[in-house]
Amino acid sequence: MRTLRPIALVATTLFLLIGCGRNRSDSAATSNKVRVGYIGITCEAPIFTAVEKGFFKEEGLDASLVKCEWANYKDVLALGGFDITHHLVMYFLKPIEQGLDVKFTGGIHRGCLRVQAAKSSRINSITDLRGKRIGVPGMGTPPFIFANRVLGAHGIDASKEITWRVFPAGELGLALDKGEVDAVADSEPIGSLLVAEGKVKNVADQAQDAPYKDEYCCAVIVNGKFLAANPKAAAGATRAPVGRKRLFGVQPGIEHGCHFSFALCSKRLGRGDCRELSRRRNENSRYVESHDRCVRSGQARLRSPRRGDG
């Protein structure tokens, strides 16, 4: 009998744990709560606008923001530390190829990345970068990947003919000023701020140069398990940052980035110097015609907002 009691206790405990797990799963499948990850860059403007303007609430969702860091951002999403985010496509492509369980559910905007050289330098084209030093915010980051794509397209072996130097994103302009690099690859708002300060000229521009100008830079990305268990919540959480004709009566999604980018930029440079940044974000946002085409897993059918919504 003494031997049977511990066995019975273990069996009871396991039964309770299994029961709790089932309840949590059922609850998660019908929950309206969604955790939205962010780092704090201008590209994430649609997230903040959707929260501040109540777009998540309009979708019946209770959204909470989860602050993340670059170093473990992808892994935290895949492991369920948060449910959904909106971020640079290039940052997730290789990890997805290697099995990271996340899904793209909608494009947001274009034109976040650039390669820039000092305004007074003799570097005027991509071919001028052969043998040069390029500053990046990190190896494997979207600016680094974009620069590699552009260099490769012009016959430059980025692994042999370029010297890569890593600096914090906010110090790339300083590195250029000090002559520590010949060019920089950056994302927003760094690129627009350096242009506004008169420090750089664009050598490659994802917003203006083919074929990159026709590609989404940023997209909504969802944890795979969350998408499978909560297709309705995933659909609503995708629609919220993508936007509708409800802010300024213009093309859906366009003003999301402009709204927050202008506010962020104004704190540093003043309103007058930020018009170019706002204009750029306004021009390069693009509405997603159908989320369905973006979801390849077949786990959810996401309906895009109609153009007349608002």
Image (spheres, rainbow, N blue to C red):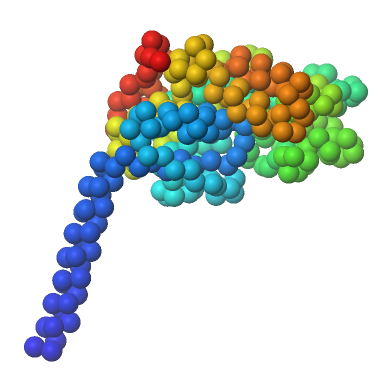
- Is residue 26 placed above or below 263 in the rendered structure? below
Residue at image position (61%, 14%) is 283
Residue nearer the viewer, 170 or 167: 170
Residue nearer the viewer, 112 or 211: 112
Residue at image position (16%, 71%) is 12
Q: Is residue 196 left or right of 265 when viewed as pictured?
A: right
On-image quarter of the N terminus: bottom left
The image shows a total of numbered marks equal to 0
What percent of the width, then of the height, locates residue 114?
Answer: 70, 25
- Is residue 151 placed above or below 166 in the rendered structure? above
Residue 162 appears in the rendering: no
Residue at image position (84%, 39%) is 175
What percent of the width, then of the height, locates residue 139?
Answer: 67, 42
What percent of the width, then of the height, locates residue 271?
Answer: 73, 24
On-image quarter of the C terminus: top left
Residue nearer the viewer, 118 or 162: 118
What percent of the width, then of the height, locates residue 55?
Answer: 42, 28
Q: Residue furthest left?
A: 1
Residue 140 image-quadrant placement: top right
Q: Is residue 73 left or right of 105 when viewed as pictured?
A: right
- Is residue 189 placed above or below 212 in the rendered structure? below
Residue 25 appears in the rendering: yes
Residue 84 image-quadrant placement: top left
- Is residue 1 placed above or below 148 in the rendered structure? below
Residue at image position (47%, 37%) is 85
